[in-house]
Amino acid sequence: MSDPSDEVRAYETLRAERPDLFKNPPDAATEILPDYPPDQGPFGVRYRDPYVTVVRDPVRFHDGRLGGHFRLLHTAGQAGAAILPVHDGRVILISHFRHATRRWHWEIPRGFSHPGEAPEETAHRELTEELGTTATHLEPLGRVHVDTGLCANSTHLFWAALDTPPALTGNEGIERYAALTPTDLTALQSHGDLTDSFTLAALLNTHHRHLPPFDHPT
């Protein structure tokens, strides 16, 4: 190995532990290399905390060039869960401040999984932490890749029937919530106020599966 740095040693450990993240399909347009091209570094694990791991892979691009490519991995091994909650025939959205965009967003509850935590467990925990309530039923809605150009992992989507209305705790950077009909949701999106990818994907899947509140005309 040409680079003995801590970053590369951590990368090699991750590659041994999670080979699925480093596979090269036969038709891969960008190939992850077993070695490190000289004068193209730095490579390896560039940052890690309990939630995200940033790596720079040694790669051969589709045109034959050698170099590096950044990816964002989720340290727990999976991205977590995002949940579309429904109570009394209305979708519950929260107004959540996000540091990355420096603005408030209307979105559904979501969160990272703890190590070893199943997606369903994450979903139940996030509903309790963000809405102060629980679900009587969770319906899987599939998965979503929120940014295929950067993020390696997918997030599990769920539809949830709430047993009680939300009771915000004020501990999650959440300003308020709204209980919205399909007409309200259409208006919110038409005005450009609904941009969160998790929320849009969950709404699309809920509508496609004819789950409440899209189970009957409004």
Image (cartoon, grey):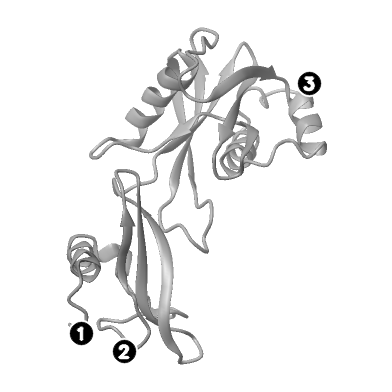
Lateral position of residue 8 relative to residue 132, left or right: left
Q: Which quadrant is home to the C terminus?
A: top right
Q: Earlier in the sequence, mark 2 or mark 1?
A: 1
Whether pointer 1 and pointer 3 mark residues with C-beta atoms closer than 8 Å, the reply is no
> How many numbered markers are drawn?
3
Lateral position of residue 202 relative to residue 215, left or right: left
Residue 112, given in percent of the width and then of the height, sits at 38, 38
Q: Quadrant of residue 67?
A: bottom left
Mark 2 highlights which residue? 38
Q: Nearer the viewer, mark 1 or mark 3?
A: 1
Mark 3 highlights which residue? 218
Between 164 and 99, the residue placed more toward the observer is 99
Cα distance, mark 2 to mark 3? 62 Å
Q: Earlier in the sequence, mark 1 or mark 3?
A: 1
Q: Quadrant of residue 41?
A: bottom left
Whether pointer 2 and pointer 1 mark residues with C-beta atoms closer than 8 Å, the reply is yes
Cα distance, mark 1 to mark 3? 64 Å
Cα distance, mark 2 to mark 1? 8 Å
Mark 1 highlights which residue? 2
Q: Which quadrant is home to the N terminus?
A: bottom left
Is 57 placed above or below 34 here?
above
